[in-house]
Image (tube, helix red, strand yellow):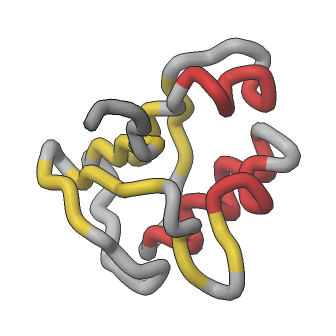
Amino acid sequence: MATVIVPSPLRPLCEGAATVEAAGATLGELLRAVDAICPGFWERTVEDGRVRPELSIALNGHAHRYGLSEPIAPRDEVAIVPALGGGR
C-alpha cells in the first residue's frame, strides 16, 4: 500500500491522522481509496476530473502537477501539499 501524507487542513476528515495507507494503481484510484477511509477526501482534493489547482502532489519527494492517471506503486509516498499564500 502507498502512504498518503495528509495536510493539516484535511486531517479532520481522517480522524486527525497525518498519514493514511491505501492502495491504488493510479493517483485517482489512490485518492478514491483514501476517500473510502476518510469520507469527503475526494471532494476536497479533486475538481473537474483533476487535482484541485490549489494543491500540489509530491510523489516520493518530487513535487509536480501530477494527473489522476499517474501510476502509483505500492511503496510510494504521496504528499498532498496545499498552496502557500502571503508574502510580497
* In the depicted structure, whether residue 85 falls above or below residue 42: above
> Residue 28, percent across and down?
55, 73
* In the depicted structure, whether residue 55 falls above or below residue 53: above
Q: Is residue 21 shown to the viewer in this render? A: yes
Q: Residue visible at 34% across and 79% down?
A: 70
Q: Based on the displayed image, in which of its 4 quarters is residue 80 positioned?
A: top left
Q: Residue visible at 42% across and 45% down?
A: 83
Q: Residue visible at 14% across and 43% down?
A: 61
Tell which residue pokes out farthest to the right in this image. Answer: 39
Between residues 45 and 38, which one lies in front from this camera angle? 45
> Residue 3, percent across and down?
40, 38
> Residue 13, percent across and down?
79, 31
Between residues 82 and 42, which one lies in front from this camera angle? 82
Q: Is residue 80 shown to the viewer in this render? A: no
> Residue 2, percent across and down?
39, 46
Q: From the viewer's perspective, is 8 left or right of 12?
A: left
Q: From the viewer's perspective, is 32 left or right of 64?
A: right
Q: Based on the displayed image, in which of its 4 quarters is residue 12 positioned?
A: top right
Between residues 75 and 79, which one lies in front from this camera angle? 79
Tell which residue pokes out farthest to the front in this image. Answer: 88
**In the rendered picture of this protein, how many numbered marks are placed on residues?**
0
Q: Residue visible at 64% across and 27% down?
A: 9
Name the quadrant of the C terminus.
top left
Q: From the viewer's perspective, is 2 left or right of 54?
A: left
Tell which residue pokes out farthest to the left in this image. Answer: 62
